[in-house]
Amino acid sequence: MSNPRQRAVIKVFRKFSNSIGPDALQFLEDVLDENDIPDEDIESSIELIAKEYNKEDDATMKVSIAVLRRVYEGLKDQGEHTQVERETVLPDQHLFFIDAYEMPRWVWSQERGTFERVTAPLTISGSAESRVTSMRDRLNIIKQCVLRNEHFAPSTLPSRDREKLVTLKSTKQLLGRAGERFLLLGMLAHNKEGKVCLEDSDGRVELDFSKLDEPGEGFFTDGCFVLVEGEYTEEATLDIIAIGQPPCEPRDVARSIYGHIDFLGKGSTSLAEDKQLSLQIQEELSHINFFCLSDVWLDHIQTLPGLAKLFDHCVDNEFIPKVMVLCGNFTSKSIAHGNARDIQRYQDNFDSLADLISRYPDIARNTHFVFVPGPLDITINSVLPYRPILSTFTTKLKARLPKVHFATNPCRIKFFNQEIVIFREDLMSKMLRNIVGVKPEVKSEDLKRYLVQTILDQGHLSPLSTHIQPTLSDYDHALRLYPLPTTLILADKYDRYALTYTGCHVLNPGSFIGKALSWSMYKPAEANSEECTLELDTED
């Protein structure tokens, strides 16, 4: 029978999906004895080793004692050289703007139990295989997070709590077991008869919502993945008793397991490096701010005067933002295909914006301007992820602004250890239109929380079926939110909000033009945001 110290070691490594053999277990016991680690500090000490172990490129699911020894020696060396000289912090050297089409594609390998990088060239058309892989990736990533959750992770040791463990089943295990209760993880979809069913990698089962009193929190839409508990019937349907979103995994937990994987293509960092970079931002760059504006309708009579007032306010108060994110739509109404007058006016509006910004040399010279297209803007494609605004409309802006970036939608900003995802889509209305089963009766504040919870729990910016929201299958990974970003900007025409869920700060700046000028100011040093407003001039 294993002793309490061994059980603690096994418990910690199981949390990171590792199994540990007797040799590695004995080695870690010797490490604990060598360093006189008290019982109450065992889990935190072993967790540090487990995190560092999983960052190694040759780390295996069954703990390798050779890699474990190397990790321990490295930690001892770090302890002897904790004082590291800091170099001068140059923010622009740690600021990256990442387009959706630049991100490397990592897919989930069922055999290896980790991510593998796709080396084959990606195409706009995609393939039948990539369309299947993109959906399987979403399921498998959510599933491995669920199985790591303490309510679902099976114990390797005898325990009184083992009977309370909730065990996931698949649809193939339902056959011939009518009258039994099951917990399933799968995607909500409609079958050929138009009835709601749950699909997983093994099959599908029709759902009956008649016995469900109240769904769990969040939006349950066509195409999202859910946990469903219910009773299988003789009619081959599942009578739902409870339905809920899969549990969301915090960023630091995911980074502790997959920190060695460079999801953004800009170099990976360890958790120790992340912590040091975070301290640098807090101590030395507390003055840096990002502005985010949405629905910057350049054809609206109040927009350019409103931007001029905002720039005046910045200059008068010597408050120049490091980054200014301008999200579409850059037109208040859709442009008819082939309408030369509307297209010319669209270009003239961008030229007028270039003239306006160039009148503020401090801002034009020092601020990074990021333009993110909206659903009505003119881009090459109309399928997510959207390409940048066509270059024919942005020539003057490129000539006048040295730090201008015409981004895809979505796009990402990497600033030191922080990952900021920007997505311009009218998500609230789209999600509400596609709810299946029981619709929630909630207030506006709850709707905002439900939207944020659903997007982050799903780990995807568009948890909808592809017939509702088409996506390019080879680039579906650009919509993935795993590991969770530090900050998510969900620019939407819906009411503005800012809230934090599972450590991820989510904000919607709302429309720039309304009863007042409205935008959001993000503070990297705090990983938080403020809602900002300026009154419109009466003559405007």
Image (cartoon, grey):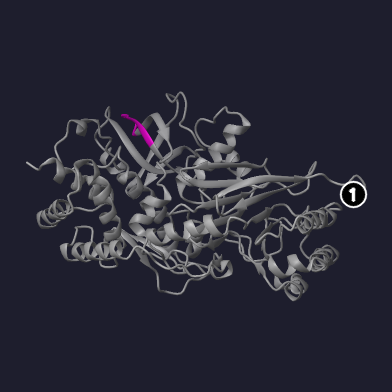
Expressed as whole percent of the image width and height from the top left, the position of residue 522 reads: 61, 52
Q: Is residue 273 left or right of residue 314?
A: left
Asked which secondary structure carries label 1, the reply is loop
For the image shown, how many numbered marks are present on the structure? 1
Q: Is residue 299 left or right of residue 270?
A: right
Front in this rendered view, residue 496 or 40 = 40
Q: Type of residue at label 1?
A: Asp
Residue drawn at point x = 40 percent, y = 73 percent: 119
Residue drawn at point x = 51 percent, y = 30 percent: 438
Residue drawn at point x = 13 percent, y = 51 percent: 33
Q: Is residue 326 left or right of residue 221?
A: right
Q: Residue furthest left?
A: 1
Q: Quadrant of residue 413?
A: bottom right
Q: Which residue is mark 1?
A: 540
Expressed as whole percent of the image width and height from the top left, the position of residue 18 reads: 23, 53
Q: Which residues are magenta?
A: 228-236
Expressed as whole percent of the image width and height from the top left, the position of residue 539 reads: 93, 47
**Does the magenta segment cover residue 62?**
no
User: Where, quadrant-wise, is the N terminus in this rendering?
Assistant: top left
Res 191 visible: no
In the depicted structure, whether residue 348 falls above or below residue 488: below
Front in this rendered view, residue 445 or 204 = 445
Expressed as whole percent of the image width and height from the top left, the position of residue 419 reads: 51, 58
The residue carrying pointer 1 sits among few (fewer than 14), some (14 to 19) or many (20 or more) residues within 10 Å by Cα, namely few
Q: Residue furthest right?
A: 539
Res 405 visible: yes
In the depicted structure, whether residue 62 falls above or below residue 124: above
Front in this rendered view, residue 39 or 8 = 39
Front in this rendered view, residue 281 or 293 = 281
